[in-house]
């Protein structure tokens, strides 16, 4: 049997092309102003390191970039019904470098592009009366999807939890 024009060959060619496109999207650096301009939705969870309990969340996001400043509005809905709204204001400092503030963030977060094209930043936010340190990593999954993982610490060194979000462009 010849596979030169068979459906199997066409399926294999399609899969190779599809995986190649995904690898190409991951290899390109994540650009804050490109990915976060427009409407996005994030879904994920916060996992408590001490108890193992999880709290789900959905975040509706809307970003606008004016050439220098990216404003990212975030509407949070937690699995227990709590709602919150935050707005990040990221200012472009240099190619691949940003400085960001949010209402509850105490000092500007310095956002940098890593060698593998992901974005990394840390900040301290006042949440529920406590100062919590976040260490975030945003990495491209494909052209429409970014995964955000963060470790959360109290007093700067006691790990209290982890955040895992998958963000998708609408």
Image (cartoon, grey):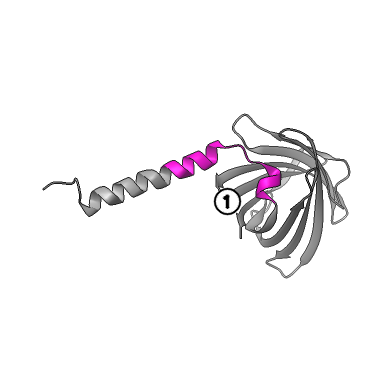
Q: Residue at x 23, y 54 (%)?
A: 7
Q: Secondary structure at mark 1?
A: strand
**Dominant secondary structure, magenta:** helix
Q: Residue 131 location in percent, x, y?
A: 85, 47
Query: On the image, numbered disc 1 is attached to which residue?
Result: 145
Task: Point out the image quarter for the C terminus.
Answer: bottom right
In the image, is 51 to the left or to the right of 103?
left
Q: Residue 136 location in percent, x, y?
A: 70, 42
In the image, is 146 to the left or to the right of 19?
right
Give the residues drawn in magenta, as a range. Answer: 20-36
Q: Residue 135 location in percent, x, y?
A: 73, 40
Extreme front residue here?
A: 67
Q: Is residue 62 above or below residue 150?
A: below
Q: Is residue 120 above or below residue 127?
A: above
> Which of the 4 quarters of the picture holds residue 121?
top right
Magenta run includes residue 62: no
Q: Residue at x 75, y 62 (%)?
A: 75
């Amino acid at each position: 049997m010849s596979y030169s024009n068979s459906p199997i060959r066409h399926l294999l060619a399609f899969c190779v092309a599809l995986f190649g496109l995904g690898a190409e999207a991951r290899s390109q650096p994540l650009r804050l102003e490109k990915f976060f301009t427009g409407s996005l939705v994030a879904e994920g969870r916060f996992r408590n390191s001490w108890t193992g309990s999880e709290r789900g969340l959905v975040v509706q996001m809307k970003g606008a970039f004016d050439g220098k400043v990216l404003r990212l509005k975030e509407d949070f809905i937690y699995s227990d019904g709590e709602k919150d709204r935050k707005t990040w204001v990221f200012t472009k400092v240099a190619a691949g470098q940003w400085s960001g503030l949010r209402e509850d963030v105490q000092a500007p977060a310095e956002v940098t592009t890593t060698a593998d094209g992901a974005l990394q930043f840390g900040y301290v936010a006042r949440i529920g009366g406590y100062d919590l340190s976040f260490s975030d990593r945003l990495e491209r999954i494909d052209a429409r999807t970014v995964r955000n993982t963060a470790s959360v610490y109290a007093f700067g060194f006691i790990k209290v939890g982890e955040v895992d979000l998958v963000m998708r462009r609408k």
